[in-house]
Amino acid sequence: MAEPAVEKRATRRFAFHLRVALRLTGESGLLQSRTRDVSSRGISFYADRPLVEGSEIQFTLTLPPEVTLTESISMRCIGRVVRVDNSDTGKGVSIAAIIDRYEFLGDS
């Protein structure tokens, strides 16, 4: 009998389907996407095309009050792609990225 998979994640993931605007370092234009889940250290999202593991990405998302426990907060993050899953989910390519740096955005 197969052993159950051991959970390796160190932080809690929130299964929020948030809009996210992605920019690949060295490319112009934005990719619009939706998150699969978000944690304090990373993000999982669906993209229309595969990205290269190890590539740097910048993305902006708005955390809802359910996460912040106050009002919605927009964040700009810089991270790296750590996993690309091309399996056919009907939602696009599943991408996982680590968040290396972030900043909270003020009101504009």
Image (cartoon, grey):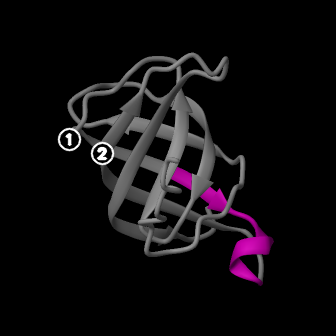
Judge left or right: residue 96 versus residue 18: left
Name the residue tied to disc 1.
54
Outermost residue on the front side: it is 1
**Residue 32, horizontal then vertical, whole percent:** 57, 30
| Residue type, mark 1 in image | Gly
Q: Which residues, given as a range, are shown in magenta?
A: 60-69
6 or 73: which is nearer to us?
6
Was residue 27 drawn as part of the magenta stretch in this picture?
no
Label pair 1/2, CB-CB below 8 angstroms: yes
Q: Going 50% across and 20% down the picture, which residue do you hit?
A: 87
Name the residue tied to disc 2.
82
Q: Going 57% across and 21% down the picture, which residue do you hit?
A: 92
**Residue 108, horizontal then vertical, whole percent:** 61, 61
**Residue 39, horizontal then vertical, whole percent:** 53, 66
Q: Going 34% across and 40% down the picture, which residue do you hit?
A: 83
| First of labels 1, 2 by sequence position | 1
